[in-house]
Amino acid sequence: MKSSVFKSEIKLDAASPVPLHHQLSEWIARDLRQNRAAAGTVIPSILTLASELKLNRDTVRKAYAVLEENGVIERSPGGRILKVSGEFVRRNAERALCSIGIVLPESMESLLEQTSRTALKTVSGIMDCAAEHGIASLIVPLPSADDEAERLSGWLREMLSRLNGLIYLGEDKDRSHGKAFEILLAEQRIPQVFISGCRFRDHLGIVHMDMQQGFRALTDHLVRLGHRRFAVCGPKIPVRKIFQLQTFDRIPLVLQCLFRQVPANTVAVQENGSTELETATRIRTLLRRKDRPTAVICTDDTTAELVIRQASELGLRIPEDLSVSGYGDTGEVPGLTSLAHPWRESGFAAVEMLAEYWRRSLPVNQLDRTLAVPLKIGKTTGKAPMGKR
């Protein structure tokens, strides 16, 4: 297997009182440390580097001598090739405090303003689990999407010098941070874990939610109650440049679970409108039908709460006249049956994956975790649903 080659945009100051060979040796050592160069990474030859930097060969030779003396680089058995030493890599790893960067879906201010504060539960799980392992955790500030390439490159170098791993909570629904995300996701020198997604990059570790098991348990529960006419409601899946493969379309999964037990012609499928008013109008139309569904399965709790409000305005009782279920467990809604997304547990799982990566030296994409999404059944009065009357 061919070793990687050290590359850097070295900038020296000829006017500085510090000799050029000391500037050069310090620059190379710092660059290798910040970029966590692997043992065996090949250093350019004296002739090559001198030519690239337009330096005297003796200047490069002296810089390399300093690096050899300090154990940063070593010669191959033949003596002709210079490589990063294993001793330097071990020292660098031992000296660095393990720290995890948390890439938030939105600004911290936006998360604090949310009523449910669900994402903060995941952040809490990450920080608490990291503290148990003696690992520091910090929020990664994402530059704006229109930052120029040079500034983004500098931001990435700064992040890498501080972090030993990254955990993503998703994307910001209002700001894409596209360039910054692309730069981070392309970085493979530190382990990265994505919570609640599909593997859209081979090197990422993923914390999965077992939605198939969850929606199967939900549909089985509703069929046991006697429901036979269903509606499935959910938002349109946005096409995102960065995370379009990460976005999990739950509607087909719900239909797959339902069609195991009920005929396809007893299920009405409805995607939400582009506005809340349009969505509410579609839901009211659905619930006014003579053959209206007796159970509505929503792919998120926000839609489920909207269904409950519209049903209540039409005089339908929840869950006696209409069973409404959702996904997320974002808050206590009377009568709502919901699959509880494991917010806090997912944060713990992501940190455990990184800790195992450091402990066992396994690729993080081989350490995926799958978490259950338990069913929380809404309170009933004991009356039979419409399907049994």
Image: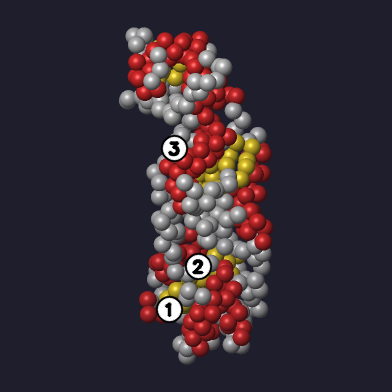
Marks 2 and 3: CB-CB under 8 Å? no
Which mark sits nearer the N-terminus, 3 or 1? Answer: 3
Q: Residues within 10 Å of mark 2 (few under 14, many from 20)?
A: many
* Amino acid under disc 1: Ala
Q: Quarter of the image holding residue 183?
A: top left
- What residue do we see at 65% from left, 56% from top? 109
Residue nearest the viewer, comparing 51 with 122: 51
Q: Which residue is mark 3?
A: 188
In the image, residue 40 lies at what x, y percent? 41, 21
Assess whether mark 2 and mark 1 are in contact (beta carbons under 8 angstroms).
Answer: no
Tell me the CA gap for discs 1 and 2. 14 Å
359 or 386, which lies in front?
Answer: 359
Q: Secondary structure at mark 2?
A: loop
Is 337 positioned to the left or the right of 72 in the image? Answer: right
Residue holding disc 2: 299
- Residue 378 image position (x, y, % from top left): 62, 71
Q: Nearer the viewer, residue 87 or 65?
A: 65
In space, the residues marked 3 and 1 are separated at their CA atoms by: 44 Å
For residue 268, the mark is: 1
- The vertical placement of 180 against 304, above or below, is above
Neighbor class of circle 3 (other Cα within 10 Å; few <14, some 14-19, many 20+) is: few
Q: Secondary structure at mark 1?
A: strand
Q: CA distance from mark 2 to mark 3?
A: 33 Å
**Mark 2 is on which residue type?**
Thr
User: Measured along the vertical axis of the image, is residue 55 above or below residue 321?
Assistant: above
Image vertical order of residue 56 relative to residue 108, above or below: above
Circle 3: residue type: Gln
